[in-house]
Amino acid sequence: MTSVIRHVTISSLDPYRLASFWSEVLGQPLHDDDHPGDPEALIEQAGLLFVTVPEGKEGRNRLHFDLQPQDRTRDEEVERLLALGAVLVDDRRNADGTGWAVLADVEGNEFCVERSQAERAK
């Protein structure tokens, strides 16, 4: 037998707030049992578990998400995520349409937004 990854666990100062951000990003709900102030929050469909830790993020992530929009362009997705509270950290988009954008979530965790499948097919 082998193992499977049940959750990716993400340390957080405010698990509900951070999970709510990612819930909006992914369009997947928080678990019904999760409420503000809880020590953990789960986006079950994505396998993301957010847990309380006492210290804030320091330094660079050891792991990050690369997002690929499904129903919009990379640039449209970047704008949507900025409106949700993300921050643009590093703009690696090129004039020819290639490249990606590095953003940070509401607790400073970096993630990338790549081109959609339709943009890659051009």
Image (cartoon, rainbow, N blue to C red):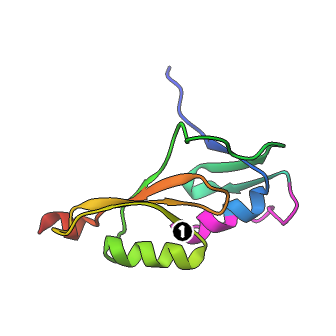
Judge from the rendering whether residue 100 lies leftward or rightward of residue 36; answer left or right: left
Give the farthest residue toward the top. 1
- The quarter of the displayed image where residue 72 is located: bottom left
**Highlighted magenta segment, given as a residue range:** 20-38
Residue nearest the observer in this picture, 70 or 101: 101
Q: Residues within 10 Å of mark 1 (few under 14, many from 20)?
A: some
Residue 33 shown in magenta:
yes
Can the viewer see residue 29 in this picture? Answer: no
Q: Nearer the viewer, residue 104 or 6?
A: 104
Question: Residue 104, position in %: x, y?
Answer: 55, 59
Residue 6 in picture, x, y percent from top left: 60, 39
Numbered label tally: 1
Q: Nearer the viewer, residue 26 or 77?
A: 77
Q: Answer yes or no: is residue 40 visible.
A: yes
Looking at the image, which residue is at 36% across and 62% down? Answer: 68
Q: Percent from the top left, x then y, of residue 93? A: 29, 64
Q: Residue at x 59, y 72 (%)?
A: 24
Q: Identify the image quadrant of residue 5.
A: top right
Query: Mark 1 highlights which residue?
Result: 25
Q: Does 60 sit above or below residue 108?
A: above
Residue lying at 61% horizontally and 42% vertically, measured from the top left:
7
Q: Amino acid at mark 1?
A: Val
Residue 100 shown in magenta: no
Give the residue at x 59% y 61%. 105
- Image position, residue 122 (x, y; %): 11, 69
> From this viewpoint, which residue is outermost toward the left?
122
Examine the residues drawn in magenta and state their main secondary structure.
loop
Q: At numbered mark 1, what does the secondary structure look like: helix, strand or loop?
A: helix
